[in-house]
């Protein structure tokens, strides 16, 4: 009886020692090494030393704050500005469609942050004449002619611009504006139109020519700007 | 018993090894849940945070359209020029000459400040007698040349005449200081430079109605004609990441 009891005890002890040894040697034990400060030496934290297989290349030049901007100043004389309006006014009166930007040198003027365009509104222009641009603010200088602008309010029956079946998000069009404020315009006047604010220009006989500066809202893709 | 003991020990060790490989260890659990956050022992449900709406494309703009009549802009220039003729030694920049009090009825120019650009006007005078320039303090008939790394400038001359010298380099260039360079030490404005004269620049004779587009980092110097002075639209367009508090 005693021999049987001792044998059972011995079998159990051997099995327990075997299990404990196997458990301690199992791969899960390696996870224990992740505990604690991996950069400790002699119980003191050491600053980690970072190394890279591929070293970072040296920059050849500082990153400019103004990428893709013109280098030199551009100057436009009031004489050239007036002549551009007269050219466009005469062309439209004769029924010739002219790209307004061809009427003044260095137009259109593009930079990463803003762009300048010449815009001509003919007399009695009809149809889709109200515009709203979510992506940029406008600063406008009247180059010649007289007319009016309605700014603010809401475009009636507003639709998103579509070109070749492709919608242009942020560009809205319509034929009229409800509400808004009407300003009378003549040569030399300025208008500031915040982003997403509807505007509709109308010209007196002779047309109205304006320089339109589009100031990008900063993150807006230029290819969506109209 | 003795004969079977090594076999038993080996089998037991294999069983223990297998058990250890699949068991969840306390030290593994202590490494936390997703994202390194400790597991919630109470099983509290995650807070229901609604998704953040898309930020606006044009935060904090003035919402109102503005119109400036050329008639008002001319009146503002004429009033400033007349005041300057009556006070020829008064500096036009920096506020060193006291508040400008224009005759009653003179239109007040109201500018507009956007996150992306800033609309204002400025007036410059030719000083009959040389006086300390507005920024560097060197003796001159003119205010100092300016150069801004962080903004493009667009000018429309609204009154008077003179010359604009642009491009080239500023001789005796200094960092601009918030309180003027000739006074006591004040905050340096990184990206803003001044000095005079311009070396190797291009000169344009300018008059009312002319425009200039001045790119970032391009030196520019206003040389107003005597008596008339020069007024202009000053439209500054931020290059994108430039602190507006530094822009001058």
Image (cartoon, coloured by chain):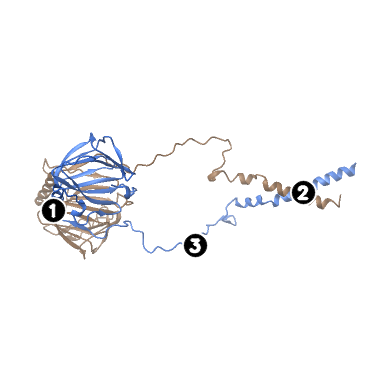
Q: Nearer the viewer, residue B247 or A204?
A: A204
Q: Which residue is depicted at the point 77% across and 48% down?
A: B12
Callout 1 secondary element: helix
The chain to which mark 3 is attached is A
Q: Quadrant of residue B184?
A: bottom left
Q: Nearer the viewer, residue A200 or A56?
A: A200
Chain B painted colour: brown
Outermost residue on the bottom side: it is B200
Chain A painted colour: blue
Q: Which residue is depicted at the point 26% across and 48% down?
A: A214
Outermost residue on the right side: it is A1
Res. A158 mark: none
How far is the residue under mark 1 from the one under mark 3? 60 Å
The chain to which mark 2 is attached is B
Q: Which residue is depicted at the point 80% across and 48% down?
A: A14
Residue A202 percent across, percent down from the top left: 18, 41
Same chain for labels 1 and 3? Say yes or no.
Answer: yes
Q: Which residue is mark 3?
A: A54
The tag earlier along the polypeptide, 1 or 3, is 3
Same chain for labels 1 and 2? Say yes or no.
Answer: no
> Is A188 left or right of B171, judged from the image as shown?
left
Q: Nearer the viewer, residue A81 or B199?
A: A81
Q: Which residue is mark 1?
A: A83
Identify whether A55 is placed above or below A169: below
Q: Which residue is mark 2?
A: B12
Crowd class of label 3 (few under 14; some 14 to 19; many from 20; radius 10 Å): few
Residue B123 percent across, percent down from the top left: 16, 51
């Amino acid at each position: 009886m005693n021999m049987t009891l001792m044998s059972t005890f011995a079998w159990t002890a051997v099995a327990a020692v075997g299990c404990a040894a196997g458990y301690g040697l199992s791969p899960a034990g390696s996870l224990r090494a992740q505990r604690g400060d991996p950069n400790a030496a002699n119980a003191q934290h050491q600053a980690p030393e970072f190394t890279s297989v591929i070293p970072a290349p040296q920059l050849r030049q500082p990153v400019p704050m103004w990428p893709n901007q013109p280098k030199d100043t551009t100057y436009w004389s009031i004489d050239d500005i007036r002549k551009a309006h007269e050219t466009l006014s005469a062309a439209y009166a004769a029924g010739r469609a002219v790209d307004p930007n061809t009427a003044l040198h260095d137009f259109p003027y593009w930079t990463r942050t803003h762009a300048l365009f010449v815009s001509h509104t003919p007399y009695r222009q009809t149809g889709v004449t109200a515009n709203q641009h979510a992506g940029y603010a406008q600063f406008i200088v009247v180059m010649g002619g007289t007319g009016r602008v309605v700014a603010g309010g809401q475009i009636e029956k507003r639709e998103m611009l579509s070109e070749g079946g492709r919608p242009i998000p942020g560009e809205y069009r319509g034929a009229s504006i409800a509400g808004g404020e009407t300003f009378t315009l003549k040569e030399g006047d300025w208008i500031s139109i915040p982003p997403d604010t509807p505007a509709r220009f109308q010209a007196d006989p002779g047309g109205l020519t304006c320089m339109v500066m589009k100031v990008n809202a900063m993150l807006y893709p230029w290819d969506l700007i109209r | 018993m003795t004969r079977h003991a090594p076999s038993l020990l080996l089998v037991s060790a294999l069983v223990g090894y297998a058990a250890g490989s699949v068991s969840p260890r306390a030290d593994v659990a202590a490494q936390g849940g997703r994202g390194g956050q400790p597991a919630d022992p109470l099983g509290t449900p995650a807070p229901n945070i609604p998704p953040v709406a898309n930020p606006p494309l044009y935060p904090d703009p003035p919402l109102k359209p503005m119109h400036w009549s050329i008639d008002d802009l001319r009146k503002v220039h004429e009033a400033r020029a007349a005041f300057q003729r009556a006070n020829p030694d008064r500096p036009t920049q920096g506020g060193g000459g006291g508040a400008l009090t224009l005759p009653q009825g003179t239109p007040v120019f109201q500018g507009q400040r956007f996150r992306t650009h800033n609309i204002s006007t400025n007036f410059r005078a030719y000083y009959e007698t040389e006086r300390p320039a507005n920024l560097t303090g060197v003796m001159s008939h003119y205010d100092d040349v300016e150069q801004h790394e962080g903004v493009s400038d667009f000018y429309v001359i609204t009154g008077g005449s003179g010359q604009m010298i642009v491009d080239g380099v500023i001789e005796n260039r200094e960092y601009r200081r918030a309180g003027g360079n000739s006074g006591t030490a004040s905050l340096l404005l990184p990206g803003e430079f001044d000095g005079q004269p311009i070396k190797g620049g291009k000169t344009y004779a300018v008059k009312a109605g002319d425009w200039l587009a001045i790119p970032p980092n391009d030196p520019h110097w206003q040389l107003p004609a005597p008596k008339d002075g020069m007024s202009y639209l000053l439209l500054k367009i931020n290059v994108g990441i430039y602190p507006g508090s530094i822009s001058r």
